[in-house]
Image (spheres, helix red, strand yellow):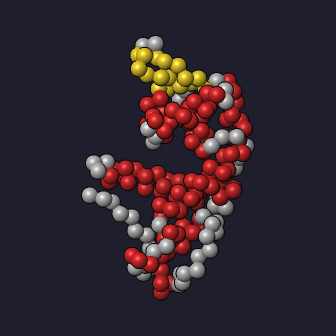
Amino acid sequence: MHARLHISVSERASTMSLTNGLRADSRDNSIDNQNQEPAAGDRSLADFLCFAIYSANLAYGRAYRQVGLTYPQWIAIVALWEQDDQTVSELGDRMFLESNTLTPILKKLEAMGYLRRERDPADERQVRVSLTDAGRRLREKGMHMNLVKSSGLKQDDFARLQKSVVTLRDNLIKATKDE
């Protein structure tokens, strides 16, 4: 069974306003047309919620380059701030990444001096990851960024959107778990 996501024109209009004009929207979004679903062949890329989320992720990636990291590198550091000294598989679970995707990210962060990767003495099959002092200092550098302000959303709207996206992610994971 394949899960399909459909969004209405009004949802798309709201999503487009959240992406802060990454694409000009020329469709008629009047009240009469807000409840009509575009015909399958008439849907443009901007009609897909998944694309709005994907492109927002790319925008976040550009924002986190200010601290000298890619977005996946940044979230690895944040996950290690929350719980240092994790195995690669534990960290991968928290980041929703497979180890073959996560390992190059960790190797790069290690080469940058932000973390250490060491075999677990209790289980040589496991690699443990921990922050260095330089990795811990990144927190201060990153905390100066105000992406809530940059988003153009009010604090409560930003928090509500974040919770909605988490709910969406969790529901999609649950719906596609057995596929």
Q: Is 169 rendered above or below residue 114?
A: below
Taking the spot 53% from the left edge, 57% from the top edge, the residue there is: 54
Q: Position of residue 137 (x, y in %)?
A: 70, 30
Q: Position of residue 122 (x, y in %)?
A: 42, 13
Taking the spot 49% from the left edge, 73% from the top edge, the residue there is: 44
Q: Say which quarter of the image contains residue 80.
A: top right
Q: Nearer the viewer, residue 88 or 20?
A: 88
Q: Is 179 rendered above or below residue 126?
A: below
Q: Quadrant of the N terminus?
A: bottom left
Residue 94 appears in the figure: no
Q: Position of residue 69 (x, y in %)?
A: 66, 40
Taking the spot 69% from the left edge, 56% from the top edge, the residue there is: 150
Residue 127 appears in the figure: yes
Total marks in image: 0
Q: Say which quarter of the image contains residue 15.
A: bottom right
Q: Is 22 rendered above or below residue 144?
A: below
Name, please, the residue furthest toward the top: 121
